[in-house]
Image: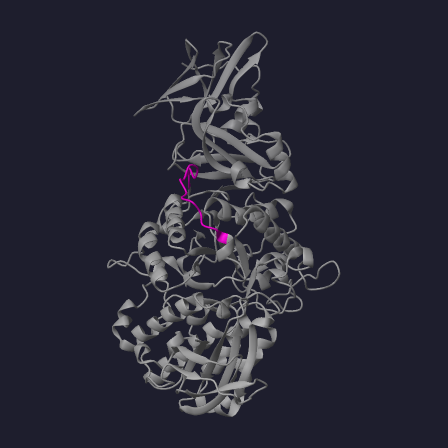
């Protein structure tokens, strides 16, 4: 039946805007509207042949008005209509989405506008719910400059005319409740821009995504996960706790015979068991927020609220976190609030304008990475990021966030020529807005998720990175010690015959070791892009390479600072890390690789059971030089625990055995050789001190007692008082 009678509340202009999907106030014209004593109903259903509407017990046919528009008089009723549409191949019955009131309330809208919605993911995105006694999904998105926003998806044939969203006043938020949409549905937002373009964007707050290269968001219900009891995170994540971190790129840690990655559930078994057996305290995952390009390793995310589908769904990732916690392992996520890619389905020009990023490329574009820079001065953008930090800490119970590329955020001239950046209001290079964002994020993280921590990958001498905000710092819990890593690796790469000239590279880092709460990182960045694997960096023949690496690891575990080691480095695989392939687990057939793996395992267990090696990692009182001999490439130092305990770390970085080395000791007694990297079990020559040495009443180095020790070639020894 065809009707040409225009409902009183519908103008010709309204009809035209509905037909071309340009109506910015669909709730004013679609659905049932009372006019005087009569009511009229309007719906837009492309490809439908007939439409009936049931109001309580009354059913009426809604005639076709124009193309996909159906319009006609209906009974005035308190009941929301149930619609039945017939198509050539099916019949659909559903509730009219334009009969539902808003889901978001005044408080949500106020907080979003203010930029202080601490649980922003509860308001925006796609949420499976019961609204006004009806099951469905509520969609909401921030797009303040859009002329029109529709949710499109598998439930409406991706047609932007069907579910045009309601504009929530001047907040910039659009929303709609769509009855019947269940978890697993695919969707995007279709956005009409002010200049007439039509964009199809993934949900910035989406909890799930299609498997790349597909780009749709996926409706996921992340409520109701039955978390087991979470252990006391504060005790394991403090600066006084042992922290030995195993950094992992989940897709390439271990692959199946067909080349595919392990799933989150499989990793919950295999990876957790391995890391536990190896004695690590924490797992750190390269970014898992959804990302389009495998080669970015996750460092160019488009879906900050979605665990990547590459290895499973959100609850599968929660299974991995829960399994790690059950095994006593903390979980750290690499988090990327510094930049995002310009893929057309992502945040770039989200509503047709530079919404999340700066418009001026001198502020809003990373030349090195071809990525966009967040506009930290915009309250809604800052809220989007701070809420994301809280999201991972609260919804997925992770223990820590390691914030990527902090230096690129702190400085406006980062990696730019003098004419390619804009100074701050005072004419300087500091990015005040980014600094304020980091302070706010850290303050909220520590206040909202007690016992968790944040860590900064920050490569400059910016002051107070790990100083609390209320004491004038950025508020991170820890900072990566990039200077230590660079200096010590430069030293280890040198032929031992030249090391005496560069002894300062191993000793100078202690001068700043207590200016921040440091993590010593041997990360993925050190074993890619032609830098070679850790074992390949070492000089000498095969035996010497492994001896050098073992000595270096012994020195690293003895040095003040928490430890971080990238996967594969623990057993000395020869190849650089390749994100498209598994680690070379076959390398463990070699005795030197097995020995290196055993050494890292023993170092972890010794570290975790020796308070002197961890409890004052961040305190100058926990360290004392005992010996430095550049000519013989010998260094030795004492480590002190907050419980009064002590141990001695002694290193020989030449391939020459050094007998008769006298070292001062903090106390008299028998000093047990708790670890010797030259032990036969590690692939060494089994030289040393027959298990320990007794101190002598011979003053040396300012101490009343000393020991006479043999330092094997290319070795580190750790002594503990018996």
Query: Which coloring applies here?
Result: one colour
Residue 637 is inside the magenta segment: no
Residue furthest top as drawn: 37
Q: Is residue 220 magenta?
A: yes
Q: Is residue 701 above or below residue 648?
A: below
Is residue 509 left or right of 85 when viewed as pictured? right
Q: Look at the image and tell me whether residue 63 can be seen.
A: yes
Quadrant including the N terminus: top left
Task: Reply above or below: 336 against 175.
Answer: below
Q: How many marks?
A: 0
The residue drawn where x is 51% and y is 86% is 706
- The residue drawn where x is 66% and y is 63% is 421
| Quadrant assignment, res 429 | bottom right
x and y percentages locating residue 388 in the rendered image: 53, 47
Percent x, y for residue 425?
74, 58
Q: Who is closer to the viewer here, 561 or 708? A: 708
What predominant SS class does the magenta segment belong to? loop
Image position of 504 with respect to 165: above or below: below
Q: In the image, residue 338 lies at what x, y percent?
A: 56, 57
Residue 530's image quarter? bottom left
Q: Is residue 421 above or below residue 359?
A: below
Residue 354 visible at all:
no
365 or 122, which lies in front? 122
Q: Which residues are magenta?
A: 218-233
Task: In this rendered view, identify the residue nearer to me: 229 or 394.
Answer: 229
Q: Which image quadrant: the C terminus?
A: bottom left
Rendering coords of residue 293 (x, y %)? 42, 56
């Amino acid at each position: 039946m065809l009707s040409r009678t225009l409902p009183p509340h519908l103008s010709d202009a309204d009809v035209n805007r509905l037909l071309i999907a340009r109506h910015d106030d669909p709730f004013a014209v679609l659905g049932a509207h009372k006019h005087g004593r009569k009511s009229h109903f309007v719906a837009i259903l492309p490809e439908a042949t007939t439409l009936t509407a049931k109001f309580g017990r009354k059913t009426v046919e809604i005639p076709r008005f124009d193309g996909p528009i159906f319009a006609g008089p209906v009974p005035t009723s308190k009941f929301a209509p149930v619609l039945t549409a017939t198509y050539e191949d099916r019949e659909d019955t559903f509730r009219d989405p334009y009969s539902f009131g808003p889901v978001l309330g005044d408080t949500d809208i106020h907080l979003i506008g203010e930029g202080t919605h601490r649980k922003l993911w509860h308001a925006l995105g796609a949420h499976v719910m019961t609204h006004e006694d009806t099951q469905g999904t509520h969609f909401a998105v921030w797009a303040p400059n859009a002329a029109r926003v529709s949710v499109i998806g598998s439930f409406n044939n991706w047609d932007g005319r069907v579910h045009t969203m309601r504009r929530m006043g001047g907040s910039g938020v659009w929303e709609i409740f769509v009855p019947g949409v269940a978890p697993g549905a695919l969707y995007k937002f279709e956005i009409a821009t002010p200049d007439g373009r039509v964009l199809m964007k993934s949900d910035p707050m989406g909890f799930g995504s299609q498997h790349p290269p597909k780009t749709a968001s996926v409706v996921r219900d992340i409520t109701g996960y039955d978390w087991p009891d979470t252990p006391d995170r504060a005790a394991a994540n403090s600066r006084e706790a042992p922290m030995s971190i195993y950094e992992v790129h989940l897709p390439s840690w271990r692959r199946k015979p067909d080349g595919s990655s392990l799933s989150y559930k499989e990793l919950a078994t295999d990876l957790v068991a391995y890391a536990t057996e190896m004695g690590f305290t924490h797992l750190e995952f390269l970014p898992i927020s959804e990302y389009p390009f495998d080669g970015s390793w996750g460092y160019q995310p488009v879906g900050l609220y979605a665990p990547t589908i590459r290895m499973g769904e959100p609850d599968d990732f929660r299974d991995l976190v829960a399994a790690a916690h059950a095994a006593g392992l903390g979980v750290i996520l690499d988090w990327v609030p510094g930049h995002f890619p310009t893929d057309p389905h992502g945040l770039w020009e989200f509503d047709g304008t530079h919404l999340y990023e700066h418009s001026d490329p001198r502020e809003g574009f990373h030349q090195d990475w071809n990525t966009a820079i967040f506009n930290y001065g915009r309250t809604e953008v800052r809220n989007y990021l701070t809420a994301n930090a809280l999201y991972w800490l609260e919804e997925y119970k992770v223990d820590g966030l390691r914030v990527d590329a902090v230096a690129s955020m702190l400085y406006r001239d980062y990696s730019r020529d003098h004419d390619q950046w804009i100074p701050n209001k005072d004419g300087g290079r500091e990015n005040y807005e980014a600094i304020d964002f980091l302070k706010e994020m850290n303050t909220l993280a520590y206040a909202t998720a007690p016992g968790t921590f944040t860590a900064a990958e920050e490569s400059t001498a910016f002051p107070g990175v790990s100083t609390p905000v209320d004491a004038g710092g950025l508020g991170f819990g820890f900072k990566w010690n990039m200077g230590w890593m660079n200096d010590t690796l430069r030293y280890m790469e040198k032929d031992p015959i030249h090391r005496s000239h560069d002894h300062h590279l191993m000793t100078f880092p202690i001068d700043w070791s207590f200016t921040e709460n440091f993590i010593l990182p041997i990360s993925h960045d050190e074993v890619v892009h032609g830098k070679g694997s850790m074992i390949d960096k070492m000089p000498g023949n095969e035996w010497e390479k492994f001896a050098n690496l073992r000595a270096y690891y012994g020195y690293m575990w003895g040095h003040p600072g928490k430890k971080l080691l990238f996967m594969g480095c623990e057993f000395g695989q020869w190849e650089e890390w390749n994100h498209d392939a598994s680690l070379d687990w076959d390398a463990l057939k070699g005795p030197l690789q097995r020995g290196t793996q055993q050494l890292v395992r023993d170092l972890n267990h010794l570290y975790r059971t020796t308070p002197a090696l961890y409890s004052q990692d961040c305190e100058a009182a926990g360290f004392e030089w005992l010996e430095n001999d550049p000519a013989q490439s010998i260094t030795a130092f004492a480590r002190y625990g907050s419980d009064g305990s002590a141990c001695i770390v002694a290193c020989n970085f030449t391939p020459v055995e050094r007998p008769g080395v006298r070292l001062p000791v903090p106390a008299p007694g028998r000093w047990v050789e708790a670890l010797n990297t030259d032990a036969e079990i590690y692939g060494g020559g089994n030289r040393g001190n027959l298990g320990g040495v007794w101190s002598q009443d011979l003053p040396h180095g300012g101490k009343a007692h000393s020991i006479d020790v043999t330092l094997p070639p290319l070795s580190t020894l750790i002594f503990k008082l018996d």
